[in-house]
Amino acid sequence: MTIASQSIEIADIQSAAARIAGHAHVTPVLQSRTINALAGADLHFKCENFQRVGAFKFRGACNAVWSLPEALTSHGVVTHSSGNHGAALALAASTRGIPAHVIVPQGAVRSKVEAIRAYGATVHRCAANIAAREETAEAVRLQTGANLVHPYADVRVIAGQGTAAMELIAESGPLDVLIAPVGGGGLISGCAIAAAALAPDCKVIAAEPAGAADTFESLQRGSRVGPFVPDTICDGLRTLIGAINFEILRKHGVEVLTVDDDETVAAMRLIWQRMKIIVEPSAAIVLAAVMKQRDRFSGLRVGLILSGGNVDLDALPWSSSSTPTQQEAVA
Amino acid sequence: MTIASQSIEIADIQSAAARIAGHAHVTPVLQSRTINALAGADLHFKCENFQRVGAFKFRGACNAVWSLPEALTSHGVVTHSSGNHGAALALAASTRGIPAHVIVPQGAVRSKVEAIRAYGATVHRCAANIAAREETAEAVRLQTGANLVHPYADVRVIAGQGTAAMELIAESGPLDVLIAPVGGGGLISGCAIAAAALAPDCKVIAAEPAGAADTFESLQRGSRVGPFVPDTICDGLRTLIGAINFEILRKHGVEVLTVDDDETVAAMRLIWQRMKIIVEPSAAIVLAAVMKQRDRFSGLRVGLILSGGNVDLDALPWSSSSTPTQQEAVA
């Protein structure tokens, strides 16, 4: 079963939706009058920060776990991830009661590793480089017989992430534009497939940090650029786009808008203040893309996937003498 | 029309709900598996942080504005408030297209005053003491003929706030306990009336800061205590309970649980981290009350009113070099 032999259709996303129902949340779509007024557009925010494990990643992981033939379940699943995908796969495996192995590089955030263990997964440590991660994952796979669930270059994962766009379109009705962030490309490629089938007039746009704009460059030149050193606070978007993900974006004519970190931080602040929800920089980048080109989106119905809400709140001043109190009002 | 001559029935709350429909949001009720597990109870959070102006206050203000006989509307409404009620009344008046006058003491937070003006209200400044506020409001009332809408000691306001509990009970079904914060008592007294009629077996509890526990003391001794100097970060709860509000709490046997600020901050942090929503300390106090007496609430279905989400986010480190990035995972 190679990637090249596989294509993903809307039926795969619909099957994924049925498979993850009862495990994943159908997250709410929120609107803000104030932000609509500031943007001059009709913005529909799909709140994956409210998804289990705090990010859309649970959708794809859950679909992969529940796609496994029963005969293979006893060997469990394996992945390498220092981010949300590891926690998502660990939790997804626990919903089916099967083993999960997560390869975590040295130096990963301790609370994240603890979360993966708390969901019942076995954590395997490796050196902090991509070669070590892949080698360790392969070794664990051979030892255990576990099924590899790649964070984004996996058709089951892509189909699962596409359910976010499917739900958004079902709830918000016809959209002129759909915007999602791009890192490895699991979310945006699933969204592109869903939109093409369910809202064919909807333009699909990927928001990418200017400091990690490999997808933008790859689409420009028509082939994937090589490894690069990312420079962005959007820690979920530092990954090189996957091969299958790149092909899906090309096929569906997805456009990439690059955004500077300062613009992303301003958008994140606006969302916290006005919508009273916590989103991470990698999520806020979609609003930053709209605010950067207000004229282009003026008057349009725009769907935006707020991909997650996992920020390190330990950095905030949590004490009764320093905690910020009431000030901003919203309408 | 004196307070003593007035009583509030469930019909008043139902009328208020009809009156504010289309202006106020029916806010969502959220649950968190993680917080349920930590609390050992089934917690239903009514998210008034998502209400317009970021707090439940809009309900009461809106009901008062839309209760005015048509003949009185041209003179508008007046109140004194340095907090959310001023902004709420200003916005409510704008929904009916009538004038609003808000008396704001010197030293009030600038962004709050700007918000009141942005909603179209006329701001009148006065000295920063309660006598000056009441005198100035009375002078404006006599000059303009505007109708006084007190922040909490007003039957229209109480009935409006009660719609929050009505919606929560309608959505969540039978509750064993309903908890709301108490400051001036507009919210908790409206909730007590709603619960008595709609969920008569539901125990109603007020959460009050230990550093502003006048309601607790007043109920203990059977009469309202006098003015005091509050010492709490819960800036929405520093007010002395109103006379009519106190009588309603007595009549309905509402119990007060006092909470230390450190407990409130811990609860606020938990809500931000696990629910990905922003609530202010005056809201988080309801969860702190549960966590303080876990044994008592163990296994119960508890409704909690998260009263608002207006915190001063300017105090946070908003720059692309210092903004916190991804860490915590939630289930």
Image: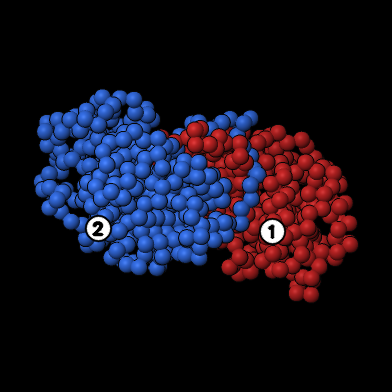
Chain colours: A red, B blue
Q: Who's the residue at 84% across and 47% down the image? A: A126
Task: Provide the chain ID for the residue under circle 2.
Answer: B
Q: Position of residue A326 (x, y in %)?
A: 41, 37
Horizontal side of B255 relative to A131 (left or right) equals left
Q: For the point 40% across and 68% down, which residue is it?
A: B174
The local secondary structure at tag 1 comes to loop
Viewer-side residue, B160 vs B152: B152
Q: Classify residue B33 as left or right of residue B243.
A: right
Per the image, the residue denoted by label 2 is B251
Determine contact: label 1, label 2, CB under 8 Å: no
Which is nearer the eye, A32 or A115?
A115
Above or below for A175 versus A197: above
Residue B95 shows in this picture = no
Q: Residue at x 42, y 55 (%)?
A: B304
The amino acid sitting under disc 1 is Tyr
Q: Amino acid at mark 2?
A: Lys
Q: Quadrant of residue B303?
A: bottom left
